[in-house]
Amino acid sequence: MTVDLLRRRALRRTALLGAALAAPAVHAATVAPGRVIVVGGGFAGASCAGALKQLWPALQVRLFEPRRHFASGPFCNAMVAGLRDLASVSVTPAGLAACGVDWQAQAVAEVDPVRLRVRDATGRWHAADRLVLAPGIGLDWDALPGLDAAGSERMPHGWLGDASLLALRRRFAALRDGATVLIGVPAHPYRCPPAPYERASLFAWALRGRRAKVLIADAKDDFTLRPQFQRAWARWPGTVEWIARAQGGEVHAVDTQRGEVRLGSGERLRPDLACIIPAQQAAALCHAAGLVDPSGWCPVLPDSFASTQHAGVHVLGDAAAAYPLPKSAMAARGSALLCAAAVCAALGQRPAPVPQALQSNCYSLVAPDAATALHGSYGVVGGRMSALWQAAAMPGEDEALLAQEARDWYAQAVRDSFATIARHR
């Protein structure tokens, strides 16, 4: 079976999953509608809130997402490299409000997983029959000596929040000819595994012909799509250098005041731009609610994404520990659809969902109109989330076609998840 066929089958199965879970509910009229609170309006939370209303229109669905517009994740590296504007990678929950979701444009200050309620920024408590948490990641500022939230502004990670993305974009745009950029990559797990290497690729493309250097200081000895990225880097000889952990590449400490990065080899570097991506964990809200395990992530049941720590709570998206399911937008949406069906079943509105495989197509740009990709299907085997198959783009695949597929997928994902239209530039 060809990689192209696998990729197209994955896209089709994602569409079929949504259609299957949206099938008419049984005995809906005989069940009193319940209340569900969703915390976090990214791909996972938005998809779940919308699916809940689609499955059970009478259900009261309240979504807490304080950001009225925010960068969604996919294509953000292209924005940082100057290939797209911020609006083209931004989304809004406003479309969900028009579909009947009660969107509260404020943050949640506290989650009570025992009484199934949340406290908003004004101090008011909101109770529900089920809680769905999709608050994303938190940055672990204790993992790297010398790096904290304030100092990180001098070594912008561009991994969380529009402000960091825009700061990194400004710093990158101001680089002189002959500049050196260093990207510090943490150990797994972290949001979007191929993203640091996509960033390096787009930086190298944007700096081509300017005698620049892009260093990747890695805490790992391998990475997602390594052969595919290295083939792309060969187009700009000498521009990209990957330093594996075994070669002393792991970042051991930083001095943000001096702009200095110390590697495991003992070498001290002072690049023109240091982009240090911090180690990651589930968002602080999950830690405070007692939903994490010693890994720092939220363990869940793989068939419903129900928390194993507290009954009546589900955790979706990047915060969930569902390895080997990647922390990608497509996987987040697929898991959200399964969770929505499981929530409706738990509230008595429909039968328990039939187990469905989750699809993840991770596209990575290596140039404005060229991409590579990793495709995978994931499902429950022996009570655990497992990889059913995975396939990477092969040498000779049409990179321009993959880039167009990435753009088409993103536009469709925004429409499906946020009930709105994505801009292309």
Image (tube, rainbow, N blue to C red):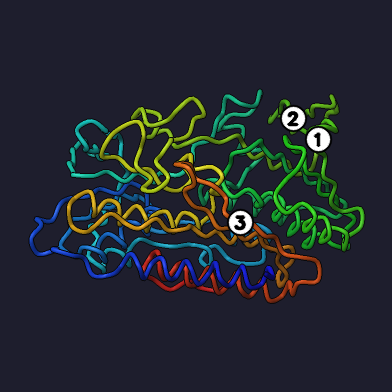
Q: Assess whether mark 3 and mark 2 are in contact (beta carbons under 8 angstroms).
A: no
Distance between the alpha carbons at the discs numbered 2 and 1? 8 Å
Task: Identify the residue shown where x is 71% and y is 72%.
Answer: 369
Task: Identify the residue shown where x is 81% and y is 49%.
Answer: 214
Under circle 3, the secondary element is strand
Please state which of residues 388 and 248 is positioned toward the viewer in this rendering: 388
Q: Which residue is mark 1?
A: 270
- The three-letter amino acid code for the residue at tag 1 is Arg
- The x and y percentages for residue 360 are 55, 59
- The three-letter amino acid code for the residue at tag 3 is Trp
- The x and y percentages for residue 288 are 36, 28
- The three-letter amino acid code for the residue at tag 2 is Arg
- The x and y percentages for residue 153 are 60, 39
Residue 332 in the image: above or below residue 396: above
Decide: few, some or many residues near mark 1? Use Cα within 10 Å; few <14, some 14-19, many ≥20. Answer: some
- The x and y percentages for residue 280 are 56, 36
Task: Identify the residue shown where x is 9% and y is 64%.
Answer: 29
Residue 152 as seen in the image, left or right of residue 372: left
Q: Which residue is mark 3?
A: 389
Quadrant in which residue 222 is drawn: top right
Q: Assess whether mark 1 and mark 2 are in contact (beta carbons under 8 angstroms).
A: yes
The reply to whether residue 68 is in sight is yes
